[in-house]
Image (cartoon, rainbow, N blue to C red):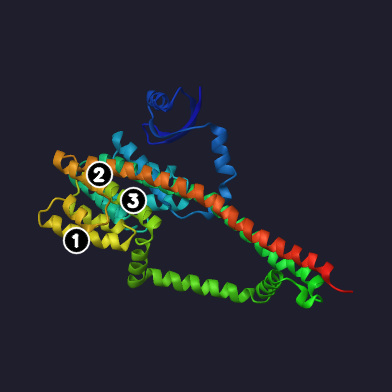
Amino acid sequence: MPLYSYKAVDSSGKVIQDVLDATDEMAAVATIQEKGYVPIRVTMGGGGKRLLSSDLTAPLKAILKRVSGKDIMMFTQDLATLLEAGLPIDRSLSILGNVSEKEQLQALVRDILRIVQGGGSLSDALAKYPKAFSKFYINMVRAGEAGGILESVLQRLGIFLESSQDLKDYIKSALVYPIFLLLVGGASIIILMTYVIPRFSIIFEDLGSTIPLSTQILLASSNMLRSYWWAFFLIFVVGYFAANRYKKSPYGRNSLDKIKLRIPVAKDFIQKLEVSRFTRTLGTLIQSGVPILKSLNLVKGIIGNKVIADALTEVHERVKEGERLSIPLEDSGVFPPLAIQMITVGEETGKLEEMLLRVADNYEKIIKNMVKRLIGFLEPAMILIMGFVVAFIVISMLMAIFSMNEIPF
């Protein structure tokens, strides 16, 4: 039987960490509950795996102290589990403050606990940390508190954050190999241009006009790179900061987002990504009891493309006037017909939030397939480009060497 490691709390609130044998995760949870514990987290793998993560990765954890989206996801899921088990909010937060592995997350949870124990609500405490908890998150918690369904809302939030994190992790992991290829290939070309070619230039410097044109271009490029590398670096740094500043300005962001939606492949990908974000967030908010008009305002804040976000302002105004959601979405021209049809069906059947989440699931699958196809094309393309550059360097040098036989002595 596989080995499972778990974190749980006993009746006194003490945190228990141990391992057990079980046929599957559900059986492991049942065994933990039979012992009188409330399970917080159960993962496959024994003590050896836990020891590896706590010992070998300790220096890395010390560097990465910032509270990440994954930390907030785990905090949300664990808090929902403890509240569902019947523990009061203050005791649940106290347990999580001791269980958390990151010191910064521990400090954050303990400060939230201090505010709650002082009479503040959980949503007010979370609002003190806008960098860790978004407006969307805080408003969902506030709706859960108002409706007396905080644990249910936290469960939905945990599912939402997990789905979003899975998509981000998939895209990041898919890009690792192409980025590695780019770095290794770029470093190889720089070494050739700054170290290897200058050695050959000593041999060719007395040949004058007998050197082939391609070799002359290569030697000139090498000399320029060696002599003015600082200028290239300076141009890169200045260009990066200038582009970043332009991108953050309202006019620059709007212009760039318009350009992105005119590029065929980029438009398709961005459109589907934003539809996935929009439908999952809106569906989760409506499902948690947040009014649709307030939900639309919150969703607008998480949309990455300014053009699409601006289109949602018009959607909000028309829904406010009494129109169905699908009509202004269709008129905006930025949402795919399939998504519009599914949302229309959701409105007609009275299951809008359920259909929104289904749309999000479908488009996340489509995005993953698009990323897979893009990476499948990108990897050989990068290898070919690097191969052509290296081949040009090698052929240019060989042509110069062969031309030496034509020099009259």
User: In the image, 335: left or right of 264?
Assistant: left
Binning the other alpha carbons within 10 Å of mark 2 as few (below 14), some (14 to 19) or many (20 upward) gives: many
Taking the spot 32% from the left edge, 50% from the top edge, the residue there is: 277
Of the image marks 2 and 3, the number of the one nearer the N terminus: 3
Q: What whole-number distance in Å separates the C-alpha atoms at marks 1 and 2? A: 19 Å
Quick check: marks 2 and 3 in contact, CB under 8 Å? no
Identity, as a three-letter code, of the amino acid under mark 1: Glu
Q: Where does residue 365 sit, x and y in percent of width and height?
A: 37, 42
In this rendering, would 224 be left or right of 255?
right
Work out whether residue 91 can be spotted.
no
- Which residue carries the number 3 mark? 272
- The dot on residue 356 is 2
Q: Nearer the viewer, mark 2 or mark 3?
A: 3
Identify the amino acid type marked 3: Lys
Label 1 sits on residue: 314
Q: Is residue 60 above or below residue 258?
A: above
Question: Which residue is painted at 32% across and 48% down in the image?
Answer: 276
Query: In the picture, which quadrant includes the C terminus?
Result: bottom right
Residue at 81 percent of width and 70 percent of height = 203
Q: Nearer the viewer, mark 1 or mark 3?
A: 3
Secondary structure found at label 2: helix
Q: How many marks?
A: 3
Q: Nearer the viewer, residue 180 or 298?
A: 180
Task: Give the percent coordinates (x, y) of residue 45.
Answer: 52, 32
Q: Does residue 145 sit above or below 384 in this rendering?
A: above
**Label 1 neighbour load within 10 Å: few <14, some 14-19, many 20+:** some
The residue located at (18%, 58%) in the rendering is 316
Residue 222 seen in the current view: yes
State the separation of the CA atoms marked 2 and 3: 14 Å
